[in-house]
Amino acid sequence: MEAHYPFTLPPLPYGYDALLPEIEERTLHFHHDKHFATYIDNLNKLLEQHPSCQDWSLEQLVQECSRLPEDIRQGVRNNAGGVYNHDLYFKTLAPGPVTSPEGPLEDAIAREFGDLESLKTVMKNAALGQFGSGWAWLVSDREGRLSVVKTPNQDTPLPLTPLLLCDVWEHAYYLDYQNRRGDYFEGWWRKVNWPEISKAYDALLENHIRRAEG
Ligand SMILES: [Fe+2]
C-alpha cells in the first residue's frame, strides 16, 4: 500500500480460487475488485481537492480525521478506514492447510485467552455480536497485551495494533453463506494466515523492546 495519496488497489495476494471452499471466487472478485477498489477511488477523490492532506499516511488519515477539513472528514473516516481494513483483511488470509499461531503469539494467546479455541470463541462472539456492518479484531497494545474488540462500519481499533480482523459486512459473506454469519466465521477462521500474524506480533514485541532500551 502506498505511503500516501494517490492510493492504488494492491493485487489480491493469492489467486481468486485460493480460499475455496470457504470463500468463493465470485466473493473475492466482488470484495476485492469492487468494494475494496471503491474505497480507494472514493478516498482519492476526497483528497484530490485538498492538496494539504495528500501527504498524510493512511494511518494518519484514519486516526487524525478530526483534523481534516470538515467537508471531507466523514468521507475520509469511512473510506480511509475501508482501505486500511481491507488491505489488512486480505493479507491476513492464506490458501493452504489450516495453520496455528507460533512462538510468542502462541504464548500470548495462552496467557490472555487460555488457548486458541477460547480465542476463537471470544472472537466469534464479537463477530456475531456486532450489530449491522463492522469488524471483529484481535489487537495488541504497545506492550504486546492482546484483546478482542469490535468496531462498527469502517472504524479501526487504532492506535491499538490490529493483528487479525474478521469482516462482518454482508458483502464479505452473503454470496457464500447468505445470512449465516457464524458459518462464514468458521470458514474464515480456517483460512487465517497465522504464520504471518505471528511474524507481525514478533515485530511488535521487538519494537517494544527497542523502545524500552532506547
Ligand atoms: Fe469488506
Image (tube, rainbow, N blue to C red):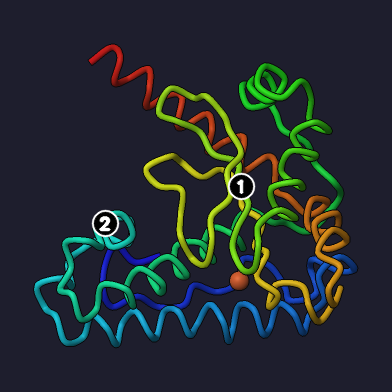
Q: Give the image location of residue 2, x and y in percent.
A: 34, 66
- Asked whether, in this view, residue 58 is left or right of residue 13, the answer is left
Q: Is residue 192 above or below residue 206?
A: below
Mark 1 neighbour density, 10 Å: few (under 14) some (14–19) many (20 or more): many
Q: Residue at x 28, y 12 (%)?
A: 213
Q: Is residue 148 left or right of residue 179?
A: left
- Where in the figure is residue 179, as x and y percent of width and height? 83, 73
Number of numbered discs: 2
Judging depth in this view, the residue of 201 and 85 nearest the camera is: 85
Mark closest to the chain's N terminus, 1 or 2 = 2
Q: Pointer 2: what residue?
A: 60
Question: Which residue is under mark 1?
Answer: 164
Say what amino acid the circle numbered 1 marks: Leu
**Disc 2 beta carbon < 8 A from ligand 1?**
no
* Tag 2 secondary structure: helix
Query: Which quadrant, please, contains the C terminus?
Result: top left
Q: Secondary structure at mark 1?
A: strand
Name the residue rendered at 73%, 50% in the picture.
192
Q: Is residue 25 above or below residue 124?
A: below
Mark 1–mark 2 distance (CA, rounded to whole Å)? 20 Å
